[in-house]
Image: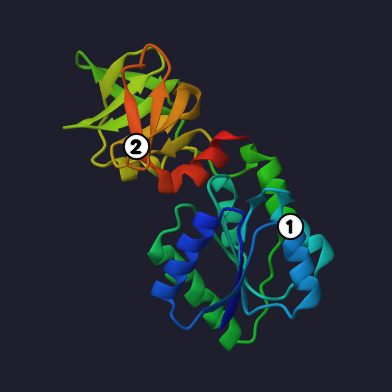
Amino acid sequence: MKAVIIEDEEIIANVLENKIKKVAPDVEITQVLSSLKTARKWLGENAEPDLLFMDIQLSDGVSFDIFNDFSLTCPVIFTTAYDEYAIRAFKVNSVDYLLKPVKEKELADAIEKCRKLRKKNEKPAADFAALLQSIANPSAASKYKEKFIVNVRNQWMPINASDIACFSKEVLNYIYLLNGEKYIIDYVTLEEVEELLDPHLFYRANRQFIINIESIQSVKPVENSKLIIKLKEPNHKLEIDMSRLKSPEFKKWLDR
């Protein structure tokens, strides 16, 4: 099965290609295209591949625009760092939608889904109009957790998710509020918490921290190929490190 990747970040494209080779050795990546312009040129000069991997937000536009110019019939697996509320729009169609960083198990499942489509000689029936409406109308899409309950002196107190500066995995799981207050939350893992959060607002920086975009003061590259994220006062003493491997994706998430 021949596949093409459309992704404007070289590091992310390389990581995705390596994961594809690992979970599906029979899938041959024939081309990596870095923009709408190059994608349009390539598709105009070549037969469509058996499978397309597409980032949604590209440096020169949105990859959905390609479907205005080409009537593609091959399965498409979209990848993106946010806009998770669009997942349902894809799940009801014969395409898939993976959040970055792409998990190998989800990638393998998506490729297997495309294999089954090819064996049945079925064409994906992606409803892109419904997808675009879902993205334009997040209120009509799936909801994320709006409040978390903390226990304060044997009383329950609701905390707005938007008021949380970050989630921290220490001995227990904690939340730091934008006002500097700190509370324990009753969740076993940060992975469990991450599934409940709006990825447009929160980002998983590392194994110990999930951060709110509104709480970020600055980001500084340091030695050992890391980034240091400094939060705004009164949480300014929290300096959160992040691998530079995630920096292109993180920068795209910040740069709205």
Q: Amino acid at mark 1?
A: Leu
Measured from the top left, where is residue 27 in percent x and y? 51, 79
Residue 161 left/right relative to 10: left
> Is there any visible trace of residue 71 in the rendered image?
no
Residue 208 placement: quadrant: top left
Q: Nearer the viewer, residue 6 or 154?
A: 6
- In depth, the one of 218 and 87 nearer the eye is 218
Tell us which disc is closer to us: 1 or 2: 2
Q: Is residue 121 above or below residue 190?
A: below
- Determine whether the residue tagged by mark 2 lies in a helix, strand or loop: loop
User: Residue 134's spot in the image, x, y percent?
Assistant: 67, 47
**Residue picked out by circle 2:** 223
What residue type is disc 2 on?
Glu
Quadrant of residue 140 within the rendered picture: top right
Which residue is painted at 29% across and 31% down in the image? 168
Residue identifier under label 1:
36
The residue drawn where x is 50% and y is 73% is: 111
Q: Which residue lies most toward the front here?
A: 223
Picture layout, residue 83 above or below residue 93: above
- Gap in Å between the C-alphas at discs 1 and 2? 34 Å
